[in-house]
Image (cartoon, rainbow, N blue to C red):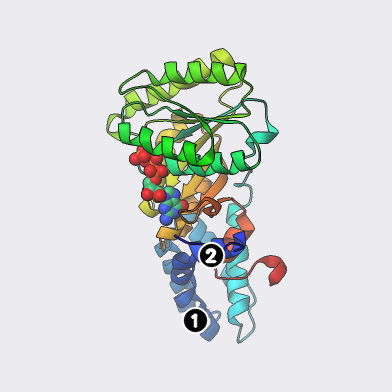
Amino acid sequence: MTDAPKKGWFSRLTEGLSRSSKQMTEQVVSAFVKEPLSEQALEGLEEHLLESDLGPAAADRIVERFRALRFGANPSELEVKTALAEAVADELKGHQATYDPLAGPRPFVTLFVGVNGSGKTTTLGKIAADLTARGAKVMIVAGDTFRAAAREQLKVWAERAGAHFESRRDGADAAGLAFDAFTKAKAEGFDVVLIDTAGRLQNKSALMDELLKIVRVLKKVDPDAPHETLLVLDATVGRNALEQEKIFGRTAYVSGIVMTKLDGTARGGVLVPVAQASDAPIKLIGVGESIGDLQPFDARAFSRSLMGLPAEDAA
Ligand SMILES: Nc1nc2c(ncn2[C@@H]2O[C@H](COP(=O)(O)OP(=O)(O)OP(=O)(O)O)[C@@H](O)[C@H]2O)c(=O)[nH]1
């Protein structure tokens, strides 16, 4: 994948969300521009919001809001899209926060949890690359000790980022590895420790036990660790992401959500019910495979992009 060197983050976001925004706006907007207050247009709106995976609760509220809106006889496409973007942004208000490992204690330990294939390794690698580029001393820990392929993939990311890499052979105790790595990171003055974990959902209770054990041993080194636990969810699985949030959110003390692969779906609206169901805020979103495609989550920018609108200052 090639990128224009200076492509701004908002245009990356817009490009990443283009499948979703197409799905979201095409029919809804044309229906409203034709007949702003008809029951039929409102029903169509609800249907399309549901098709975009926004979830019934948010879809209902947005439709009610549209019913109450006083559009003129012929609202412009811009008016309809702006109203929709504001409605979605309001749904997401209070569900955003930043991930800033360089602002916290040193070493700042982040645990990455989520099912296999959700984008954990890639997300961790992108974060490592960003942090080393900013001058931080970063350690990556391959906590999925069962899968050699996962370890190799992570090692490639570590090399690319110029981060230190800690791993153990197949089947080694992940908690033991995490403990030793964190101890070493503390002794050697690392700024950030990024710990990947296994994501086998076939054996849910063993997986959760392993995550809890990792958390327990990290706390032996520093009672406040892990300082962040990021749950990585794949937007392309649609509403299954809600199930995954439930499973991990209940046991793994998740402090932030990363929603990846928003570029790979027309149903990026799923971020809304996930944000609303979770106790943890959305912190990062992935809108493509390259490093710059992992972005801090900004509810307003996301909502505007989802409607195909330009950045606020450019509007
Ligand atoms: N298009 C797109 N692809 C992504 C994004 N994030 C991750 N991917 C891709 O998703 C695939 C799975 O990502 P991984 O990072 O391997 O997922 P994982 O959760 O670590 O999975 P395992 O390594 O199987 O445990 C890879 O091919 C990534 O390149 C994204 O935001 N957009």
Q: Mark 2 near mark 1, Cβ–Cβ under 8 Å?
A: no
Q: Residue at x 55, y 62 (%)?
A: 12
Q: Residue furthest top?
A: 220
Q: Does label 2 or label 1 sit earlier along the sequence?
A: 1
Residue 211 higher or lower than 98, as above or below: above
Residue 53: numbered disc: none
The residue lying toward the viewer, choosing from 3 and 73, is 3
Q: Residue furthest left?
A: 202
Q: Amino acid at mark 2?
A: Leu
Which percent across, then down, holds residue 220?
Answer: 55, 13
Give residue 309's quadrant in the image.
bottom right
Which percent across, then down, holds residue 55?
Answer: 45, 56
Could you say whether the residue bearing mark 1 is in a helix, strand or loop? helix
Q: Residue furthest right?
A: 313
The residue lying toward the viewer, choosing from 263 and 269, is 263
Point out the image quarter for the C terminus.
bottom right
Residue 73 in view in this figure:
yes
Residue 129 higher or lower than 314, as above or below: above
Q: Residues within 10 Å of mark 2 (few under 14, many from 20)?
A: many
Which percent across, then down, holds residue 29?
Answer: 51, 77
Q: Residues within 10 Å of mark 1 (few under 14, many from 20)?
A: some
The residue lying toward the viewer, choosing from 182 and 51, is 182
Q: Residue at x 43, y 68 (%)?
A: 48
Q: Amino acid at mark 1?
A: Ser
For disc 1, the marked residue is 30
Residue 306: numbered disc: 2
Could you say whether the residue bearing mark 2 is in a helix, strand or loop? helix
Point out the image quarter for the N terminus.
bottom left
How many discs appear? 2
Give residue 82's quadrant in the image.
bottom right
Q: Nearer the viewer, mark 2 or mark 1?
A: 2
Q: Residue at x 48, y 61 (%)?
A: 2
